Image (cartoon, helix red, strand yellow):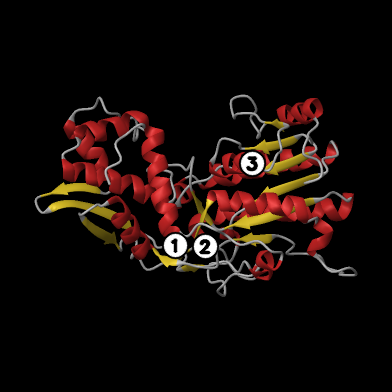
């Protein structure tokens, strides 16, 4: 792909955490011929609309970064929505990429595809060796289906569709909705609001809620309504200071990758890796051709919370609610396949947390409380 800077590239999900980072990286590398659609402009679960889009635009390369995503609460609550939407998106885009002769497609999944009790670190070969984590099983099954769909189309039709499995991502354009966000952006927003309480910054709290209401509660609500909704999401102002609830014991270990590093890995692979490079010639059973994208380093949720607390300057109390689920206790990728190709991440967690908090306050137009 690096020899065709003017090739037409479709980035599905270009406004999200993953897709926006890929667009930014492609632009920096000199690519300029992009085709994008918002969800309102193109519903990727609509097979007729997707077919019409591919017939009209005829992209040469596709990054399939569009997906229905969320944290442990959303995954466990909206199980049918997650499996249905993601299967529909994948089926439509991958099939139409085949029908219309796309030169190369990249499917982006997630390391939740690996078994709940997977050996650590998680190698690509551990896929489908045991049961999945229950809370995100529907989403994981959809992503596994996407990998197998790419492999199957390649083997039957000679397409060049590759799959990558990024670890937990964070960065610009992350989702800070407390009902649906992942742990890192949720903790950043909760500690920002907690520090605003500490400082008596009601104007900052109201502005935050105006930019991103919680269950319909915005900055125009009275104080009792605001106290109530924030209490529901674990931000509580008590006599001895602000208390912040975190689900689980804090013991689970998680790996986090800066989204712009992930995007750089994706473009690197699109430029230098084809499906035929993912297995040895003469292999009878071709499977596990996907590639992990990660740092190979992890941190406990408790340590993550402390890192964010220090970065923002929140002085309150962290309360780990052990009545809530922990999820998988350890999820660390083995990125040695990717490292062997010559790519490694550049942004470590402490730097990334500071950068994403700065992005959040600037994007929301709210006060940086550090």
Residue 327, numbered circle: 1
Mark closer to the chain start, 2 or 1 = 2
Residue pictured at 23% horizontal, 46% vertical: 195
Q: Is residue 264 above or below residue 34?
A: below
Horizontal and vertical percent for residue 291?
Answer: 68, 61
- The secondary structure type at the circle numbered 1 is loop
Q: Which residue is mark 3?
A: 28
Mark 3 nearby-residue class (10 Å; few <14, some 14–19, many ≥20) = few
The quadrant where residue 222 appears: top left
* Circle 2: element type: loop
Residue 139 shows which numbered tag?
Answer: none
Q: Residue 318, relative to residue 171: is it above or below? A: below
Q: Position of residue 13 (x, y in %)?
A: 61, 37
Can you tell which quarter of the image residue 125 is in? bottom right
Separation (CA) of disc 3 from disc 1:
37 Å
Q: Which residue is mark 2?
A: 133
Distance of mark 2 from mark 1, alpha carbons? 7 Å
Q: Position of residue 35 (x, y in %)?
A: 70, 30
First-in-chain label (3 vs 1): 3
Do the numbered discs 2 and 1 sit on residues whose CB atoms are within 8 Å? yes
Q: Residue furthest right?
A: 282
């Amino acid at each position: 792909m690096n020899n065709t800077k003017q090739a037409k590239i479709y980035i599905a999900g270009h406004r999200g955490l993953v897709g926006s980072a890929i667009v930014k990286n492609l632009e920096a590398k000199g690519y300029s011929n992009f085709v994008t659609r918002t969800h309102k402009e193109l519903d990727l679960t609509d097979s007729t609309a997707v077919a019409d889009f591919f017939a009209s635009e005829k992209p040469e390369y596709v990054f399939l970064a569009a997906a229905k995503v969320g944290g442990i609460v959303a995954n466990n609550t909206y199980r049918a929505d997650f499996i249905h939407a993601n299967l529909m998106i994948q089926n439509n885009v991958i099939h139409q990429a085949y029908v219309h002769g796309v030169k190369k497609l990249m499917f982006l999944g997630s390391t939740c595809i690996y078994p709940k009790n997977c050996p650590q670190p998680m190698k690509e070969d551990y896929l489908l060796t045991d049961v999945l984590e229950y809370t995100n099983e529907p989403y994981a099954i959809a992503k596994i289906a996407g990998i197998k769909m790419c492999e199957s189309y390649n083997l039957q039709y000679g397409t060049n569709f590759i799959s990558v499995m990024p670890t937990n991502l964070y960065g610009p354009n992350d989702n800070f909705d407390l009902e649906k966000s992942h742990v890192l952006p949720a903790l950043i927003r909760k500690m920002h609001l907690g520090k605003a309480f500490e400082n008596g910054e009601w104007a900052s709290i109201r502005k935050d809620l105006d930019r991103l209401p919680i269950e319909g509660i915005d900055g125009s609500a009275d104080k009792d309504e605001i106290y109530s909704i924030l209490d529901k999401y674990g931000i509580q102002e008590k006599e001895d200071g602000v208390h912040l609830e975190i689900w689980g014991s804090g013991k689970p270990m998680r790996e986090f990758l800066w989204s712009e590093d992930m995007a750089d890995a994706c473009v690197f692979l699109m430029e230098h890796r084809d499906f035929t490079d993912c297995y040895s010639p003469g292999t009878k059973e071709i499977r596990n051709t996907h590639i992990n994208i990660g740092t190979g380093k992890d941190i406990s949720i408790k340590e993550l919370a402390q890192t964010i607390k220090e970065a923002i300057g929140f002085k309150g109390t962290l309360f780990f609610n052990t009545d809530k689920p922990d999820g998988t206790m350890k999820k660390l990728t083995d990125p040695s396949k990717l490292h062997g190709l010559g790519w490694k991440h550049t942004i470590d967690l402490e730097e990334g947390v500071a950068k994403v908090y700065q992005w959040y306050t600037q994007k929301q137009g709210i006060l940086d409380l550090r």
